[in-house]
Amino acid sequence: HMFNNPRYITRGIASHLSPVLCAILWDCIDQMPDEKDYLQVFKVSTQHSQTVFTHSQEQPPYSRTYRFTIDFGFTGTIFVIDDGDHSTMLLAEEY
């Protein structure tokens, strides 16, 4: 099963993302239907003091948008990659 292995975050995630948002993103992956692509993409933005993010993957096509009434203070794209041995959450610019 994809993403059922040790999980890591990069320095960029550790310094830019709240631990709560980090946990929510991992949880979104855990709650997905079973067929998961090795690359999960989260596009995060803040709108009217709310955090809005879209979780997507290419194969099979999947997209779901979430809204939180909390401003997590982050805007950007986050990748989560499963390379078989472990899963890593990183900022898109760290890729």
Image (spheres, grey):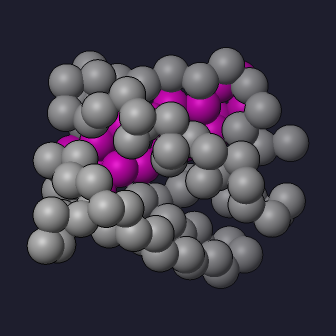
> Going by the image, does 7 lie left or right of 5?
left
> From the image, which quarter does the C terminus lie in?
top left
Q: Position of residue 35 (x, y in %)?
A: 82, 63
Q: How many callouts does the rendering have?
A: 0
What residue sits 57% from the left and 68% below the top? Answer: 57
State the extent of the magenta-drawn residues as a range: 77-93
Q: Quadrant of residue 18?
A: top left
Position of 64 relative to 13 (above/below): below
- Residue 67 visible in the displayed image: yes
Q: Position of residue 9 (x, y in %)?
A: 42, 25
- Residue 44 visible in the displayed image: no
Q: Position of residue 88 (x, y in %)?
A: 50, 31
What residue sits 55% from the left and 75% below the top? Answer: 64
Task: Residue lying at the far front in this picture: please name it.
Answer: 69
Position of 84 relative to 76 (above/below): above
What residue sits 50% from the left and 47% below the top? Answer: 25
Q: Is residue 79 magenta?
A: yes
> From the image, which quarter does the N terminus lie in?
top right
From the viewer's side, name the closer residue of 12 and 28. 28
What residue sits 50% from the left and 21% below the top? Answer: 8
Q: Is residue 18 magenta?
A: no
| Prevailing SS of the magenta stretch | strand
